[in-house]
Structures are given as C-alpha cells and as structure tokens.
Amino acid sequence: MNDMPRTSGADPAAAQAAALAACWSCRGPVDPASLFCATCKAVQPPAPIDHFARLGLPRAFEMKVPVLEQLYFGFQRQLHPDRFAGAPAKARQISQSQAVAFNEAYETLKDPLARATYLLKISGAPIEGEGAHTIHDTGLLDEQMERREALFEAGDLATVEAIATAAREDAKAAIGAIGGAFARGDLAAARIETLRLKYLVKLGEEARARRARLGAAGTA
Ligand SMILES: [Zn+2]
C-alpha cells in the first residue's frame, strides 16, 4: 500500500487518514495505530484515534471492565519505563506520552458516566457545551432539584442515608437505560439518561458530604 504513487491532486486529509506514517527513527512505514515500528521496533507517538480504538475495543457503551483492564495493563506493560531505561531520550518521551494517552483512555472508559459522556461527544450528541441546551426541555432538572432540596433539608443520618440509597439505585437503573439506548442507536434517550446519571452521581457525592458533616456533628 505504501508503494502507491502519491499524486499532488489528492485530498490531503483523506490521504493522511489512509496513509501509513513514517517511523520517526528509521523512516520506515508504520501503521499509525501501532505502538511499535515493525522494522526498527521504536515506540511510535500516540495516534489521533478515539479511546475505544486506542485500546482495541469496539465503539460501544457496553463494556466488560475485566477485558478493558486486561487490554490496558497489557499496553502499560509494553510501555513500562524500565523497558526504555537505555532508550534514546526521544523514545522515552514518546513512551511516556503513549502511557498518558492509554491512561486517559482507560480512566474514561472504565467509568460508566465518563464513558457515556465521551461516547455521546464522539457520536455528535454532547451533553456539555454547544448543542447541549435542549436538555432544559425535559423534566429532568426539576426532578433533580427536588432531590437536592430534600437532601439540603434532611436533618438526620437516616434521611440522608435513604436519599443516598435511592440515588445509588436510580444510578444503576440509569446505567442500564443508557446501555439500552446506545444499543438501539437512540442518542436522544442516551443523552437524557446520561444527564440523569450525572445528576445522580453528584447527588450521591453531596449525600456523602452531608453524611460526614452530620456524623461529625453527632460525635462532637
Ligand atoms: Zn522504525
């Protein structure tokens, strides 16, 4: 494929996407998605690919976390600093940026809320920033504000505990609903359930903080 003549009239973006990159070390052709040059074995810089592709996973919400971990730790073993102890400074630097890229991919994909948020973003239906304002048309905001008010007014641990438990159960249900929505390609529903999950995670954090304060006051 790399033997194909390059014509000056070719679309540069398309050519770049299809083309093999040149190894920084030996100038040989490398698949941009591979970690190492097949010719000289030099580590290659992170390719501009999404987190799923980086870890070799299909672009889907459903995720088997043990599989994700196995893939992630496999890549991190290949990038372990000890392996680059005697390597040129540039190779050490590239291996570190690869490690950072894999770390970011892993942290994003292992957490359901971060994974759903990211998947919506790369699917063109972000919950944050531009294009995300339509969520105010739903009753979601009112529903979550009522819960936060109840938490704010809760004066004892049992009430806070009950709110935290409900938030946890509802978060589980939201994760199930997000999976179903993505599986049937319903991005609108996936967005609403992801926002619901975001509110529920935040509510859970607030409940924990409130519980800690009430607990501290109780033992004082
Ligand atoms: Zn090379």
Image (spheres, helix red, strand yellow):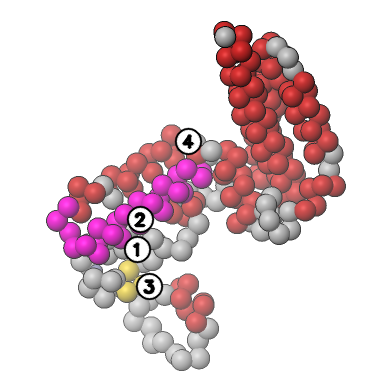
Residue type at tag 4: Val
Q: Which residues are magenta?
A: 85-109
Residue type at tag 1: Pro
Disc number placed over residue 98 in the picture, else none: 2
Tag 4 residue: 65
Instruction: Give the class, few, some or many, for how many residues have Cα within 10 Å of label 3's Cα (few <14, many ≥20).
Output: some
Tag 3 residue: 20
Q: Give the left or right position of residue 106, taking residue 45 as reference.
A: right
The tag earlier along the polypeptide, 2 or 3, is 3
Q: In x, y percent, where is residue 173?
A: 68, 29
The tag earlier along the polypeptide, 3 or 1, is 3
Q: Are marks 3 and 1 in contact (CB under 8 Å)?
A: no
Residue 87 included in the magenta stretch of the image: yes
- The residue at 83%/43% (across/down) is 138
Q: Is mark 1 within 8 Å of ligand 1?
A: no
Quadrant (top left, top right, bottom left, bottom right) of the C terminus: top right
Tag 1 residue: 45
Q: Are marks 4 and 2 in contact (CB under 8 Å)?
A: no
Between 136 and 10, the residue placed more toward the observer is 136
Q: In x, y percent, where is residue 109?
A: 51, 44
Instruction: Give the class, few, some or many, for how many residues have Cα within 10 Å of label 4's Cα (few <14, many ≥20).
Output: few
Residue type at tag 2: Gln
The tag earlier along the polypeptide, 4 or 2, is 4
Q: CA distance from mark 4 to mark 1?
A: 26 Å
Q: Is there any visible trace of residue 168 in the rendered image?
A: no
Looking at the image, the residue that sits furthest to the top is 219
The tag earlier along the polypeptide, 4 or 1, is 1
| Label 4 vs label 2, nearer the camera | 2
- The residue at 64%/32% (across/down) is 201
